Image (spheres, rainbow, N blue to C red):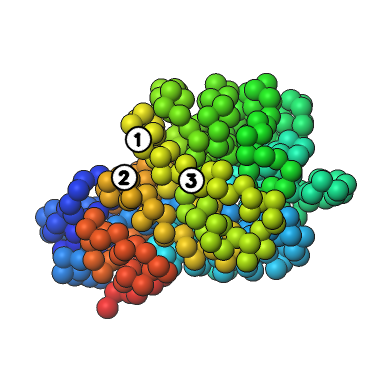
Amino acid sequence: MILIENAALVDGSRDRPLEGMAILVEGDTIREVSDRPIHAPGADRLDLKGAVVMPGLVDCHVHVIGTLVNVGANALLPDALVAHRAARIMRGMLMRGFTTVRDLGGATIGLRLAWEEGLFEGPRLVLCGKALSQTGGHGDFRGRHDTRPMTWFAGRLGSLGRVADGVAECRRAAREELKAGADYIKIMANGGVASPTDPIAYLQYSEEEMRAIVEEATMAGTYVAAHLYTDDAIARAVRSGVRSLEHCNLIQADTAREAAAAGAMACPTLVTYQALKEEGASLGLPPESVAKIDDVRLAGLRSLEVMREAGLPMAFGTDLLGDMHRRQSEEFAIRAEVLPVPEVIRSATLEAAKLLRMEGKIGCIAPGAFADLLMLDGDPLRDLSVLAGQGERIARIMQNGRFVKGGRA
């Protein structure tokens, strides 16, 4: 057992730390949290002398197998190379304080099994397997003159997605991903930046196809997340029962209110567009993709205001690729340009847990939660740069009750 004493707790639920708290960790779980001394004979004691403790951060939109910015080229890499690069990417995320991440396309259960066996250090992995896309959609990274069958790409670890057309194929694809260990289903329901043949405004999947996929997910006790930018695409997805709305840069007020009323949640990912604008071309993003960046980048901050005013909950996401993963924590500062700091922190803790349907297990410091804790050199409520960079100001990181950075001394 480990007894952490004299801690100041921050989780985004209030605008100042909760002082003088004690946390008892037993095994991989938090057993007790109290504003009074905890009696725990035999526990290793760690006096934080008033330092801030946070729950481990949660990034709800990553691609851990996205080792290159050019996702088409990434799909051609050998699986073994992708797996080793993914392990390095995930360790970087953990050292930035992200103890849980949700992969939005590409990662398979093999990576999670390797993490569970302790073969590498990284965040807990929530996954969808391969994202589902129509032919020519955002998950189809073949160029206009590439006639290779998409089935060849779908079996590769470096591929973010697979193609399924028509209701029957969509049902089969969803069932196959669930059988293979997917925690939820991801669909591509709008055009995208990284894909070569679909403009941003391109609506993808019929509502009948989306409803079929949602039905399959619902029958399996889970939900559907959708890649979306335009207001029309978001409205169609909400009508079809999609719960997790990714990106949402071009959302309008009426649709945001309808999404909130339907119980959906949004997951903006603003840092990726800034990173792509500044670095995408130099890191191999094809010219046709570079030309689409500003279509969504310039509307990003306004979308946060629209969703907040509509009461649509927002979780934290980044959606970075390749060498841009190092910019993961910049999302905090971008959001803080228009949102209150406690809400920004909450997006990566309590709201993230809600989106992942893991309330009480992650994103909080409470009895029964995983013992994922960050011990900081500063108060992020006063200075968000405490969470910036590569975790330089995170003195200790505990995951599942084990220190992966720092230690008890």
Q: Nearer the viewer, residue 403 or 256?
A: 256
Asked if residue 183 shows in the view, the reply is: no
Element at label 3: loop
Amino acid type of disc 1?
A: Arg
Q: Tell me which corner region of the image, top left, top right, bottom left or bottom right, holds residue 86.
A: bottom right
The amino acid type of the residue labelled 3 equals Leu
Which residue position is annotated with label 3?
298
The answer to whether 280 appears left or right of 274 in the picture is right
Q: Amino acid at mark 2?
A: Leu
**Within 10 Å of the Cα at label 2, are there few (<14), some (14-19), or many (20+) other Cα atoms?**
some
Q: At 67% from the left edge and 63% from the top edge, which residue is drawn?
A: 284
Q: Nearer the viewer, residue 153 or 109?
A: 153
Above/below status of 206 relative to 146: above
What is the distance, in whole Å, between disc 2 and disc 1 at their CAs? 8 Å
Residue 248 position, x and y percent, is: 50, 37
- Observer-side mark, 2 or 3, equals 3
Tell whether label 1 touches label 2 (CB within 8 Å): yes
Callout 1: 10 Å neighbours few (<14), some, many (20+)? Answer: some
Q: At which x and y percent is residue 332?
A: 37, 54
Give residue 383's position: percent from left, percent from top.
25, 61
Label 1, on which residue?
Answer: 308
User: Looking at the picture, how far across and down is residue 200, in whole percent?
Assistant: 62, 39
Numbered circles on residues, count: 3
The residue that disc 2 covers is 339
Marks 3 and 1 sit apart, C-alpha to C-alpha, by 18 Å
What secondary structure is marked by label 2? Answer: loop
Mark before the other along the chain sequence, 2 or 3: 3
Q: Which residue corresponds to the image point at 45% horizontal and 29% vertical from the top-left?
A: 252
Residue depth check, mark 3 versus mark 1: number of the one nearer the observer: 3
Q: Earlier in the sequence, mark 2 or mark 1?
A: 1
